[in-house]
Image (cartoon, helix red, strand yellow):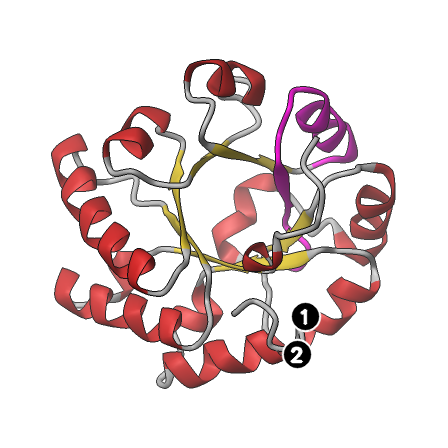
């Protein structure tokens, strides 16, 4: 079982959305700015790319994350994670079980997206190293998963699951503290960093919510 020791890199978990940028170059520049600001966990989640495009982008992000001693996590595709030498893969509730991935790719860190206490417990039983739990707050990107879970359910999941729990969905800088107060190990987010006009500085402000110890 994964312990929390040595997982400070996971506290601030940034998920990509290159559609927010005019070009891949702009996206890569923004990614480096986030890494410069202290992000140490970056999930490559670009579902509209071909395998070749994912590999090309993943290789570029692998170089950047390695330069900043950060982890690169591949969304859903363990096979591509292995090709680009990513550190892990992030699964959905309905994809292959974490222990199945680990049996084939034993070196990969495996995270799982969850949207209920039952799903969180199942992910733990199936060998996940960490989970995201969402949506905590109302957010368009998680509208398909129903109404917000709220802080009360975040607290219950954090208490009943012996895994790092990352609060996801509608996360902003000013909501980090209340998520941590409910027992979340960290936060996962997309838009609040990528939409910032000062990505490096905004990312750094997030790291300060964890005492700067994502670095």
Which one is in front, 200 or 132? Answer: 200
Instruction: Give me the disc on residue 21.
Output: none
Residue name at image x 66 percent, y 78 percent: 174
Residue name at image x 72 percent, y 33 percent: 120
Q: Secondary structure at mark 1?
A: helix
Relative image position of residue 119 (x, y in whole percent): 70, 28
Q: Specify few, some or many for label 2: CA neighbours under 10 Å numbering under 14, 14-19, or 20 or more.
A: few
Task: Let me know if residue 104 appears in the view.
Answer: yes
The answer to whether marks 2 and 1 mark residues whose Cβ atoms lie closer than 8 Å is: yes
Instruction: Give me the disc on residue 174.
Output: 2
Residue name at image x 22 percent, y 71 percent: 29
Residue name at image x 81 percent, y 56 percent: 183
Report the magenta residues as a range.
116-138
Instruction: Give me the disc on residue 176.
Output: 1
105 above or below 30? Answer: above
Is residue 29 on the magenta stretch?
A: no
Q: Secondary structure at mark 2?
A: helix
């Amino acid at each position: 079982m994964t312990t929390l020791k040595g997982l400070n890199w996971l506290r601030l978990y940034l998920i990509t959305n290159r559609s927010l940028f005019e070009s891949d170059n702009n996206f890569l520049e923004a990614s480096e700015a986030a890494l410069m600001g202290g992000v140490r966990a970056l999930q490559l989640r670009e579902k509209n790319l071909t395998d070749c495009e994912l590999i090309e982008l993943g290789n570029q992000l692998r170089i950047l994350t390695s330069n900043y001693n950060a982890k690169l996590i591949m969304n859903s595709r363990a096979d591509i994670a292995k090709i680009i030498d990513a550190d892990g893969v992030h699964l959905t509730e309905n994809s292959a079980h974490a222990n199945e991935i680990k049996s084939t790719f034993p070196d990969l860190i495996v995270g799982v997206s969850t949207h209920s206490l039952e799903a969180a417990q199942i992910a733990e039983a199936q060998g996940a190293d960490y989970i995201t739990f969402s949506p905590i707050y109302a957010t368009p990107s998680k509208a398909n998963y129903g109404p917000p879970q709220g802080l009360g359910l975040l607290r219950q999941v954090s208490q009943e699951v012996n895994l790092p729990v990352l609060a996801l969905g509608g996360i902003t800088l000013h909501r980090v503290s209340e998520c941590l107060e409910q027992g979340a190990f960290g936060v996962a987010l997309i838009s609040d960093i990528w939409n910032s006009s000062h990505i490096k500085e905004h990312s750094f402000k997030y790291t300060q919510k964890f005492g700067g110890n994502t670095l």
